[in-house]
Amino acid sequence: MPSRDQEIDPVEPELEILMNERQSILRVVGASAALIACLDSKRLPLGAVEAADMVATSINDLSEETLQDALNSVHAEIEDDAATA
């Protein structure tokens, strides 16, 4: 019967892969959120507006904590229009 250490050992590389993948995904989401926040939808072609809306909807579905992790991963901050107006 394998010891507890032998059972856990194969899980560690998989966990490392998953954590690295999460960091990559957070960078993509953070960069996407920063890009979407800067866009002026009135100046975009219709196809780009539709794509931006799809990305924005997906980002809005994230938890606040995950979105903040994503923004932090690319050192971005999204300004609240209400706060700047």
Image (cartoon, helix red, strand yellow):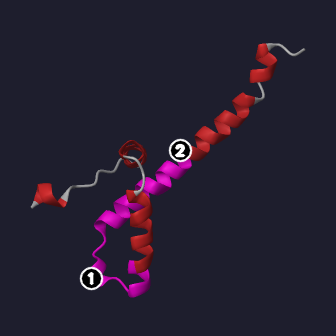
Tell me what residue is drawn at x 40 percent, y 47 percent: 63
Depicted 62 relative to depicted 36: above or below? above
Depicted 82 relative to depicted 12: above or below? below
Category of crowding for the residue at label 1, using alpha-carbon neighbours closer than 10 angstroms: few (below 14), some (14–19), many (at least 20) = few
Image coordinates for residue 58, horizontal then vertical, percent: 44, 61
Q: Quadrant of residue 65?
A: top left
Image coordinates for residue 19, horizontal then vertical, percent: 59, 38
Image coordinates for residue 7, horizontal then vertical, percent: 79, 22
Quarter the N terminus occupies: top right
Q: Which amino acid type corresponds to the residue marked 1 in the rendered image?
A: Lys
Q: Which amino acid type corresponds to the residue marked 2 in the rendered image?
A: Gln
**For this rendering, which residue is in front, 18 or 53?**
53
Q: Which residue is mark 1?
A: 42
- Which mark is on residue 23? 2
**For this rendering, which residue is in front, 6 or 1?**
1
Image coordinates for residue 32, horizontal then vertical, percent: 42, 61
**For this rendering, which residue is in front, 80 or 75?**
80
* Secondary structure under the numbered disc 1 in the rendered image: helix
Give yes or no for residue 39 being in the magenta stretch.
yes
Q: Which residues are magenta?
A: 23-49
